[in-house]
Image (cartoon, helix red, strand yellow):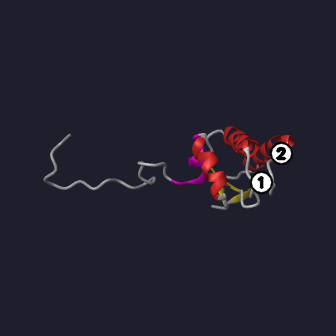
Amino acid sequence: MEIHRLVLPGPGPAAPQDAALLCARLARLYDGGARAVVCDAAAVTAPGLADVQVLARLRLAARGRPLRVTGAAPALRALLDLVGLVELLGEAEQREPPRGVQEGVEPDDPAV
């Protein structure tokens, strides 16, 4: 499967028009047949809530289709975790096993 990329502008906070432009690009990628899109956030070295807003709007524009953020600096990771968008990073939330991992069950374990 071919991975398509979007690049977030940086290093400072996103500009107000960035969300609309990136959402339009995302829509064109999906309309053009993209099955998954990766959003590269490596350039965002001084994130703010404007960057979180851009990512939240991209999440909505994806409409349930695969969208993942890569290259997020620790500060952006912390902001995404704070607002509940950490799943965009493709990482498991705290106390949650990664996707596709099942807990092991021993034969002598009692039923719950």
Give coordinates of residue 93: x percent, y percent.
Answer: 49, 48
Quarter that holds the C terminus = top left
Name the residue rendered at 39%, 55% in the picture. 101
* Measured Cα–Cα span from mark 2 to mark 1: 8 Å
108 sits to left or right of 20: left
**Label 2: which residue?**
18
**Label 1: which residue?**
8
Tag 2 near tag 1, CB within 8 Å: yes
Q: Quadrant of residue 111?
A: top left
**What's the mark number on residue 94?**
none
Amino acid type shown at disc 1: Leu
Give coordinates of residue 13: x percent, y percent.
Answer: 79, 49
* Residue 31 is inside the magenta segment: no
4 sits to left or right of 86: right
Give coordinates of residue 89: x percent, y percent.
Answer: 59, 53
Quick one: label 1, few (<14), some, or many (20+) residues within 10 Å? many
Segment colored magenta = 84-91
Give coordinates of residue 28: x percent, y percent.
Answer: 79, 47
* Residue 87 is inside the magenta segment: yes
Quarter that holds the N terminus = bottom right
Quick one: label 2, few (<14), some, or many (20+) residues within 10 Å? some
- Give the mark, 2 or 1, whose residue is nearer the N terminus: 1
Q: Quadrant of residue 40?
A: bottom right
| Disc 2, SS | helix
Residue 36 visible here: no
